[in-house]
Amino acid sequence: MRIERKPVIEGDEFAWGHVLSSEQRPEGTPLSLPVARMLASADGRASIAELSERIAAAAGVSDEATRARLTEQLAAAASILYVDGAIEELAGLGE
């Protein structure tokens, strides 16, 4: 699996976005920028909360409520990607 920049549908037109591609899904699964960053920085050791904190810090987000929402959204996205079979674990995509 790999994270790539490809055209994705945004509203009524195409825009450059991030997708998670694999041999089984060469067209890719569209990802939001925070989810793409989470998957790219996943090392198999850091929790989703730790990855979320890194992403928030890099983006300059200091509001605790916003950080909490980001963690919830990243956890939900990881769960959906796992259930859909797009990811098996949070490791190896950033290499």
Image: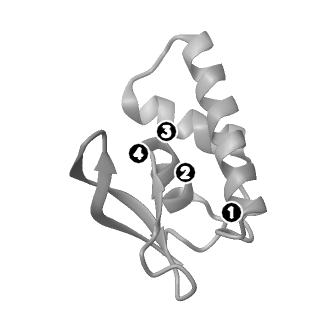
* Left-right relation of 62 to 59: right
Q: Earlier in the sequence, mark 4 or mark 2?
A: 4
Label 2 to label 1: alpha-carbon separation: 9 Å
Q: Which residue is mark 4?
A: 33
Q: Earlier in the sequence, mark 1 or mark 4?
A: 4
Q: Which residue is mark 2?
A: 38
- Element under label 1? loop
Q: Which residue is mark 1?
A: 90
Q: Residues within 10 Å of mark 4 (few under 14, many from 20)?
A: few
Instruction: Tell which of 15 and 64 is nearer to you.
Output: 15
Q: Amino acid at mark 4?
A: Leu
Q: Which residue is mark 3?
A: 55
Label 1 to label 4: alpha-carbon separation: 16 Å
- Coordinates of residue 25 in the picture (x, y in percent): 52, 79
Q: Residue at x 54, y 51 (%)?
A: 38
Q: Residue at x 53, y 88 (%)?
A: 23
Q: Quadrant of residue 89?
A: bottom right
